[in-house]
Structures are given as structure tokens and as C-alpha cells.
Image (cartoon, grey):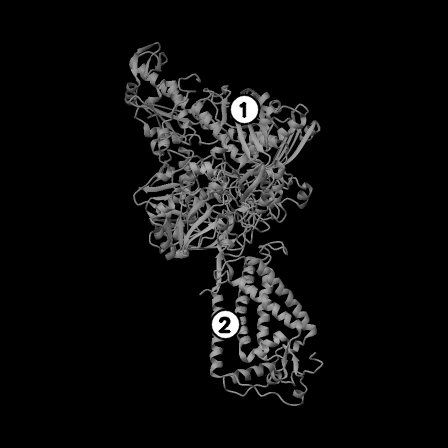
Amino acid sequence: MAVIRDTIPAFELFQPTSLEDALALKRRYGKASWAYAGGLDSLDWFKDRIKRPDAVIDLSGVAELRGIRDVDDGVEIGAMSTLTDVETHAGIQSDFGLLSDAASKVATPQIRNQGTLGGNVSQDTRCSYYRGGWPCYRAGGNICYADTPTSINREHALFEADRCVAVNPSDTAPALIALDAKFVIQGTGGEKVVDAEDYFITPSTDITRMTILEPGDILTSIRIPGTWKGAQFYFEKVRDRQAWDFALVSVSSAMKISGGKIEDIRIVMNAVGPRPLRLHDVERQLKGQSATEDVGAAAGELATLGNRPLQHNAYKIPLMRNLVKRAIRGLEV
Amino acid sequence: MNIFQWEQNPWGQDILVRISWDLLWLAIIGGAAFVIGHFIYRAKNPPQAAEPATGSAADAVPEKVVRHSLVARLFHWTMAITMFTLLITAFFPIVGIQFEWLKIHWIAGLVLAGIIVFHIIHATFWMSLRDIWISSKDWAEFKLEVAHVLGTGKAPPKPGKYPVDHRIYHNLVTLAGVGVIASGLLMMVRIDTPLFARNPYLLSESTWGWVYVLHGLSSVGLVGLIMSHVYFAILPEKRWMTISMIAGWVTKKDFLANHDPERWVVTEKASK
Amino acid sequence: MANGKLFGTNYSPPDLVAKMTGKAKYAEDFRAEGMLMAKLLMSPMPHARVRNIDTRAAEAMEGVHAILTADDLPETDNLVGSDRALTMEPMYQGEPILAVAAVDEQTAANAIEAIRVDYEPLPFVINPLDSLRPGGPNARVGGNTVKDRKDVVEIKWTAQDFAEAGEEMPMGQPEEEFELGDIAKGFEEADLVLDETLYHQSQSHHPLESRSCMAYWQNDKLYIHVSTQSAQRTAPGVARQVGIDPTQVVLIAEYCGGGFGSKIGGTVNMAIAALLSKKAGRPVMHRVTRSEENAYGRARPGFQGRIKVGFKADGRITAFDMYLIQDNGAYGRSGDFTSASRCVSLNYTPLNMRFRGISILTNTPTRAAQRAPGGVQITAMVEPVIDKAAKELNLDRIEIRKINAPDNDTVYGSNQHNVTSAYVRETLDKAAEMVNWEEFKQQSGRTNGSKVTGVGVALSSYVAGSRGFDGLMVIKPDGNLYVHQGIGNLGTHSTFDTARVACDLLDIPWENTVVVWGNTGKHLPHSSVQAGSQTTHAHTRANLAAATALKKNLQEIAAKELGGSPDSYDVSGGRVHRKGNRASGMTLAHAAERAIELGAKYDGHEVAEDINEWTKTAAAGLAGQGAMGAAKDNYGGEGDLWSFVVGVAKVEVDRETGAVAIQHYTAVCDTGSVMNPRGLKAQILGGSVQGFGLARSQKWVYDPKWGVPFTQRLYNAKPPSILDVPLEMEGAAIEIPDPQNPLGAKGIGEAPFGAGVAAVLCAIQDAIGEFDLKRSPMMTDLIINQLENQAQPYKVLETDV
């Protein structure tokens, strides 16, 4: 069979108007189904004829999945809310600026108008080999083309790689982990609410997926509790160009300062591993310390412990170290 | 049903990737069919207590006969644990139970490889290789046994230390074991371990394909073999053997009922 | 002439509204009844021989109308050197093997998936140096370089060549070589000698419009809509590719969404739609996707280079020894590396110079001229070396360029040509004045938190015109002037700009001028290709010649009717009239009617002998419609046309993240008289932005084991985004007329690109404070490794990583 790209093969398109119908379709078609949010990841796969679902379930008509609501002390964001919605929402900007900042750094305004928060956190990796349709581990094969003696792996992982060395490309996912968000999943087992951190998996658990979403599941909303409301936030994304580019490394942090000391902090890196990497050790070390340059530098050193660079990605080590430093220092006022 | 899984490589060429996991189900069904078949046969032809062996050699048999040395037992059970670990870590994710399996799998694989090397050395120098060897005479007895089971002949003579069916089983496990370990060790070059520099391009694509096929065939073969092994181990009439693999010895009664003391000469001394 | 009313003023070109509103129809926007859609089967391998193609299953599919393979293409000459639309021996991943025409693209794609192609993989090579090693792979079966544009031959360097070079670029037997003066003596006289191994990447052209094409046949005449830079000059190429006579081609190409040299005479895939249409008996549209554009589109060849330069203490270059290995792709032979030698010879006027070069075939996309071919690469490679010398000699960076700069008396290159003009010192001075250089350069090394500022200046040059083409225009009885332009509408506005020359000469308002362009059915004259910045120079002159001929005709018509000598008449205010007396004369509309009555040369029934056959045919088509002016540019001239750009950049490099922000950019050019100030700014700043991409983010990435590229989509090819462009950008010209063009104008399309790349590279290098990167693009990862004293993941000479 000759390979051809750039032409979407036929599939059956469903446009349910209720979550119930969408879930019923997911149940009916199981693995042959594809939940379609903003389409920015999906269409890439479809047009290259690599992922070929029988049934595409377009979630854009499901009203329950849209909207940003105040809940208790925090907000609940429908998974189909666009990144522009998230970026420009006044409440999120004032209370959870970390998320609006991260959302504003995604791709381009056009993509943010179309792309959804649910899609951004659930998107597949951007490993060139995998996206090229090569039969790698993640695609069900038994080889990682990105980690051979001759591979080009500048964008790949420093941590948590297991056979597959691809990274999670999302900008909003690490920010949501830093904000201790909860992801609400509806599926065959009813409603499930998981910590943002637990939504993402590594290849050691399932090499073909980035998240815990099962074929029958739909991510319906993301709840941000009030825990980190108004904390000091830092987001920085380093990339090759300033628009339409994925992070080489990003840092998201939320920090509470009390009496000049760090009372509590959550700090998460992305694009360094198969899932957003929460720096638990760094968080523990930082508690009770002052947010200074030196403390930040020490935190940066700790953050990079255990890294396993590939041929082309060792630059991510100092980059990560410096970003952690900047996250701490950046909050110094 | 597919036997092999094929993929298209980056150049669009068909490459052999591994066996189709359909074969896992085939092995399970095959193993189960054997167990069920045997169980039905056994129900129709209940096992009868064999006449104990007699004679001077029989008289010389001590009350407790050491059947498996401590070393041999440790080997067996370590192997059992690693085997189960390997099979669980290999096949549970395939059937949909996801967990972090790979590290446990290759560590268990290394343990298995290690103890098998030990077993080979130990068996070569401290055990009698002849006990496990299958000679042409053994084949003749095996034929007799099969004929007997099928009701067309008399019972074969009692065996020495290891009945011929055990020896056939052992050798099948040896074959599958060597296949799975040799291929598994090579496959460690494809993953990231502290042992080897990772190099998926060490062998050609087609060679790798056959390495994976060997690993797959050996392991699904082991699934079937182990299923039947466990089945026999829990049968009441075989329990004395299972117990001996724990305790190490068999009673004189069980010995004489199941072994030919002429062929397995046991003395007090040898049994210490 | 530069004092004409329209020349030198801003205006809205007549295609602007259509472009802005989306009404402009590009090749892909056309539809025809019964139109089929084409899809290509492209090689998955970088080099292979097709042993067998089994299309039975595809042909049996409903909706599949025709399948075209290389066997259906007409034989053309020079098959060894150039590529064709389809091949049985693909030489790069993505080279088209066959095309399917079906009722829609989905069906065509499904049909392609049903086709089985049996390939025999052949050895391949991505890095030219790998091919030069003893026993290294060749990109083609017969060898690794093309000799005399026809024979593939093998050149291998010796193990000793490689061993002696160590970490630097080896320099074995070259293919091209020349020496000016005595290079050894030059180095002896030098106070400082720098010897650098450098790399400049290959790069796709990235026109916004891909090379889509639609074709249909009517009575043996081929109507073809293409994306091409040149209009008239594309038609013969279509004819050759399709195997028909040029008179059988009607080519429609009113708009072109960029070509940058990749569509000079159209594209090689034009044959596919045309021949599929013939085979299927229905119109065929071949839409080219972005990744396909980057596969069988064209690309700039990369250079691996060794540059040894000797400087006197005052900065004067006494010796310039350059060796370039050109990454040629698998087809043809690019002239970039020899052009590079010309740029060096001209920009730095070294007292002694040697050039050596070799062009090695690789299994990567076909190369072609890309905006300042050779000039961009060599400028980006050499300018940072000049900066390094300035630093070591403690010289000002503008001064070191001035002391080596050419002027109107310079002779340059292997054949020691003259230039028509070179006001480089003036350009450098103007740039210095515009940025307030003395203050500007003080910002170098200034820190702001983790950020450090760097400034860079770069001199770039490129050819800027040609001569001897034809102009063709008619004043019809409606009183309007119809200027027929054979050049393409590439977006540079020169199609319209150069027509305005006629308006100025004939004093016809722009509103009464109709530019006829983009359709060879509309009688277009022989023109220069829309490439190499030729059109501004060539067609201001051609249109001036034609307008002059037309004016002469008008004067004669008036004299015939009203008496007196033709010389006593003038043309102005929409009339041809007695000098000093507007009332005594006739309207141009009337003169047009008279011309038709008079026939002969007045209405185009007779034309000058020296004009091109193509123009004669066009004139014959227009004959009898009004008063015609048809003439060849016989203004002559001596020397080559070159324009120059000085770029000045300021960047801020974040030492912690490697992020680079270009904060300011000024480009000043020597382009002679300015025809269209707004168009000029678009050219010089647009070209600079293209340069920022090569400096910062654009490169090819190939997996070396499989020879497959990963940078064929816009998101992973990373051309600069608007957020990568500084808010402060200035552009200006020194506006000294070129003495050899009656209108004083030279082209300016090419040179801004190289200045953009080099000024930014120099500025980054200035900010980092070290000259260690030695390759473009200077991306975040390399900058961080450099700043953190961490080993780079690859050596300078590695390509496409």
C-alpha cells in the first residue's frame, strides 16, 4: 500500500448536541471513535491518514462542555471552552493568571480561537517520527526511532522516558497542575474526578496514550479550586519563534509567600518528559525559604537531577535549571 | 487470526514486527484444551494406585528419599516466581491491564537468565545429566505410555528419577526458555537500561523481526506449558511430587509406587 | 527621466484590491466543467529504482480516470542533469512517481493507496562531505556531481584530505577554481589571518502559494493556469515539458503568491495537470499541499565552507581564500557557489583572491535560485568573520566595511567585469547616520537583567538588472494606454511600476493606463524572467524604448495630418500637439484612430526588425487596434548591474534562556533611483524578515538513517512569525541614480535577504561575545550550549540536523 498524506480519508461524522449522546456514541464505537474538540491535533492526524477513526464525534455542539463558571472559590471551565475564552476571561486573569498566561502563549490567535482547553491538555505528542507515521512504540510498533545512535531528538525528553522519548507539548497542562486543577471525566464508569497531575501518564504505563482517557471517556470540564487563588504565578515558555511554536521547555509555578518565606509552592515543567513534570522535591526544598536568586539557583540544580539527555537535547538541562531559577526569582518583589 | 504483526517502515516496506497477540489467545486456549481434555479423561479413567516396586533394591530404599536438593528447589521456585512475573508483566498489559511493567519485566528476565545459567552449571557438575536426557529407549517407553493411556497396551515400566514425560516437558521448557531469554537479552538493546547502550539499529529490521517473533513464540509457548504444569501440580495423585518440590523428599511408599529403584538407585548415603 | 510625475511616487497598484479582498484568482482558484483532481504518489525513499508499478486495483476503482507515469512524459534533452515531473528513479524522499486523476481528491488518494510500487532501495547521501569521503555513498548511480551540465561523474577526496583537515573543513580536489592576484603574497602581507570553517543551511523557498496547476485542452490548444514568477517566459517551458509547440500554449498566471526563485519559468509539475488532462480528456486540477511544496518545490543549496581571510591592520583585505562545498541536491547544477565568489570579490574587493568550489549531489530536494542565490549564504557566512576581524584589529565595524568597499571603478569576479554603479560607502554612511551609529554601537554588551544587547551590521550585494528586452504598448481609440507586460506579477509591483515609465514619457495619467499582464493569450512581449531583480532595470528601459517609439509614431501621425515636422510636436495632457501650443493638435484617441487608418508601423502592422519573434507575434495580434509602440531596449550599457544593502540590527539575547529578540533593524540600499517608495520598502524590509528566518529558526532536519525530512510543514519549518519581527524597522535608499539606466533605477529584490541574515547573526555573535557558533541558524539550543560552555550536539559541518 503506497503512502499518501495530506488528504483526509472518509469517516462518519457525528455532531451530538448533548453529552449523553456523545458518550453513547463513544460507547458504541469504542476504539474506532474519535472525540473531536478544536480539531487542531485531530485534523493533522486525519489529513496524514495515520489515525483513521470510523466515527468522528464533533463535540462543538455539546453545550454542557462550554462555558466558564464560578464554582465555590474557584472556576469550572468546560473542556470545549476555547483557549481564547480561557485567556481573556476576567476571573481567570485576576485569580488564576497563570492559566491565562499559559493559554496566551499557545500557537497563534487563530489557533487559540479554534483550539479548546480540553484539546490542549489532551493533545498528542509532536515527536516528528511518530507524527510522520513511523511504526514506533507509540504507534503500536516496537522501536523508538527518536532514540537511536543517529536520531535527531532536539525536542525530546530528559525525564520519565520509557522506550518512547516523546514529550508532552501542552502549555496549559502544567499550569493546571500548578493550580491543583481537577479534571472531570465522563465515561463508561460514570463520572470520575482526578487531580490534573494524575490525568497524564508516562509510556511505562501505556506507551500509546498521553492521558488516562479510555476510549469511552470524554473530558468534560476542568475545575480549579480556590487553593491557589491570587498566588504569585510565573509562566515562561522558551521556543524557537514567538508564535506558532511548541515549547522547548516551559515552567509554570504558583507560590504563596508569607512573612518573606515561601509558604507553599507548586512548580511544573513541560516539554521535558512524556507528561508535565511536577517538581515535588524542589517544592519540598523550597518551603520555608526565601524566594531569592540563590534559592532559585539551588532549586534549579535540584530540578535537573536524574535527567537523561539524548544526543541533541542536553541544552534543555541548563534551560530547565534557569527557568526554575527565574520562576523563583521572578516572584521576588 | 494473524500469526505475525507487520508494519510499514519509514520507507513503506513491510516489516515483521512481532507475533500477532492472537497467538497468545491460541496458546491459552490450547493450554486450557489440554487441561480440560486431560481432566475429562482422568474422570473417565480414574488413576489407580500403582503396585509398589519390590525386590532387594526396593528394600534398600530409605524411608525418606531426597528427590530435590535444596539448591534445586530454590532454583525451581525462583524460576517459578520469575516466570510468573515475566508472564504477568508481559501479557497483562496486552490484555488491557495497564501498569508500569517493563522494568520489572527485564529485571525478572535477568534474574531468570542468571538462575538458568546457574542451573546449567549446577546440573552439569552436581546433578546427573543422564537423569534428564531422553534416549531412544525413553522414546520407546513414551510410546508405551501413550498407548497405555489410550488403553491399548500394558503399563510401561516404572521410571527412574524423572519419568520420560517430565523430561520431555523439561526439554520443551528449556527450548522455550532459551528462546525467550536469548531474544529477551537482545531486545534489551532496543530499550533504555543501564546495561547496554541503546541501539535499535544494531540488527537489521528483518533480524529484529525474527528476534521479536522468537520472543513472542517462546513466551506464548511457555503460557501453554506452564498452564499444564500447574494443572498437574495440583492434581491429587501428583501431589506427592509437588510436596517433594517444597520439602525436598518423598516417602519410601511414594517412591516405590512411582519409581523403579533399579533405575534410580538410592542409598541412605546418597539420600542425605 | 527620474523627475517624471509618476516615477518615484507611491500609488496603489491595480491588483491591490483584488488581492486584499480575496477576489484575485490564483491557479488553484480556477474551476472548469468536469474538472478532475490529481494526487501524486511520492517516493518514500531518498533514492530507489522503481522495479514495478501495479496500478490494477487503482484503475478498477470507480471515479479514477487516468494514471500518469514517467513513461507518459515526452522525452526532453538533458535528462541527466534536470528533474522531470515524474520519475522511475526517485532521488529524494518525496519525488513524484506517478499521478492519478480522479473525480475528487479523496478518490485519487484512495487510488494511490491501492497502488503497489516495488522499489529497489539504492545508496543515498544527505551530507555532501559523506559523499566525498573515500568509499562514501553517491547520490546518483553514476556518481556525485554533474559535469558540463550533462554527465554524472564521481569525485572522491582522499583519506589524507580528511585527516589533514582535522576538525576543520577538508579541502580536496575542487571542480571550480580561480585566483586573482597572488593569494600567498596576500597572506604574507596580512597582519591578521582568520581561517574559519563555516556552515550555511539549505532552505526551501516557502512561497505562500504552492505550485498548484490547472489545465485543459481545447482543439489541441493547452490552457494552463499556473503559479509562476514570469508570465511570457513560462509558456515555452510548458510547451517543452508537455511536448508541444509554444504556440499551442495559453498560459494564465495573473497572480503569483511568491516564488523567491522557485518558480522562475514555472514549475516542473506543470506537465502533470497538462498531460493527465490530455489522457483523461477532462480538465485536471493539481493542488499542491504545503509538504508537497517543500518536497518537489525547490530549495537553496547549503554551503559548507572554509574561509581564510588576511587583513592589514587598517582592515584592508589583502587575501581572501574561499572553498565552498555546495549541497546541490540530486538534480541540475546550482550556480550559487560561483555567485558567492562574485559577491565576495565585489563586497570586499580583496587585493588577492582565490576561489575553489565543488558542488556535490545529495538525495535532497532539487535546488534552484532562491532570492540572492549564493549571495545570502556567503554574506551570512563571511560577515561575522569580518566582525571578528574588526574586533581583533580594534576597528569600527562600519569602517572595516568601508575600507574594503567597491565603487564605480571596481572590477570584480573571475572575469573581472565592471559594475554600472556601486555607491557602497555612501550606503554605509547613510546607514550609520540613520541609526546614529556612534551611539548605537555603544549598546553592544549592555545588560538588562539576564539579557545582553548585541548590535550587528552587514553588507550584502546582488545583481540588479539586465538589458535588451522588448516593450509593447498601444493607445487605443478609447484614449487609454495599454501597456502589455510579459513579466509576471510576483507581488513586487514591477509589473505595474515599470509601466508607469510610459505614462511619464507620454504624459498619460495612470487612470488612463491599462496594464495587460498575466495571460499569454493577451499578446505579451518578450520579457526578462521575473527573477534576479531584473525587471525594474530591464523593463523600465524596455517600456521607455517602446513609449519613445510610440511617441515618435504619434508625432509623425500629427505631422502627417496637421503638417510640419514630427519634431515640432509634443505629447502631453492626453494630446499630441505643436510644441508650446496645446490647442493645435489632436487627442490621443484621435491619433489612435489615425494610426489604424495609416496602418504600417503606426498601428503595429510593421514592427522593428530587432524585436524578438515572440514580441512580433504579440504585436501582430494587436496590430490595427491603435497607435503602437513596440521596441527593444537598445540603450546598451557596460558592466553588470548590482545593488547593495546595508543592514543594521540590534538584538537582545537572554543569557539564561537563549531567547533572541530582534529589537531594531534598519536597511539602507543602493538601488539607484527609487521608482515606487512603498514597494521599495516592502522589498527591503520583507527581504530582511526572510533573512531573520534563516538567522534564527529555519533549517532542514533529516533523519540520517532514513534520509527523510521532518521540516516540510510550516509549523516545523519555522519561518519567522510577525512576533519575531522587530517593531522598529526602517528602510531607505541613498537614491543615487544608476548612470547607465536612463531612468536611474536598479533592482532591489535580492540583496536585502543576505543583509537580514548576516546583520542578525553578527548581532547575536556580538551579544554572546564569542565567535563559536559558525553556522546558521543560530537557534536557542546552540546559543544556550554556547553560553553554558556545554558541548554542541553536532559539529559545524553537519548538515540538516
* Residue positioned most to the bottom: B55
Regarding mark 2 in the picture, which secondary structure is present there? helix
Q: Is residue C401 left or right of residue C210?
A: right
Measured from the top left, where is residue C578 in percent x and y? 33, 11
User: Chain under label 1?
Assistant: C
Q: Is residue B148 above or below residue C495?
A: below
Rendering quarter of residue B52: bottom right
On the question of residue A38 being in view, the answer is yes
User: Chain under label 2?
Assistant: B
Rendering quarter of residue C428: top right
- Say what amino acid the circle numbered 1 marks: Val
Q: Residue at x 63, y 68 (%)?
A: B116
Measured from the top left, where is residue B25 in percent x and y? 47, 67
Of residues C627 and C90, the one drawn nearer to the viewer in this rendering: C90
Gap between marks 2 and 1 measured at Cα: 89 Å
Of residues C190 and B242, the one drawn nearer to the viewer in this rendering: B242
Q: Is residue C642 above or below residue A102?
A: above
Measured from the top left, where is residue C557 in percent x and y? 32, 17
Residue density around tag 1, few if under 14, some if 14–19, many if 20 or more, within 10 Å: many
What label does residue B31 carry, if any? 2
Q: Is residue C424 left or right of residue B57?
A: left
Rendering quarter of residue C146: top right
* Residue positioned most to the front: A259
Q: Is residue C596 left or right of residue C242?
A: left
Q: Residue at x 39, y 52 (%)?
A: C110
Q: Which residue is mark 1?
A: C419
Measured from the top left, where is residue C629 in percent x and y? 36, 23
Of residues B17 and B89, the one drawn nearer to the viewer in this rendering: B89
Q: How many marks?
A: 2
- Residue contact at pointers 2 and 1, CB within 8 angstroms: no
Of residues C778 and A332, the one drawn nearer to the viewer in this rendering: A332
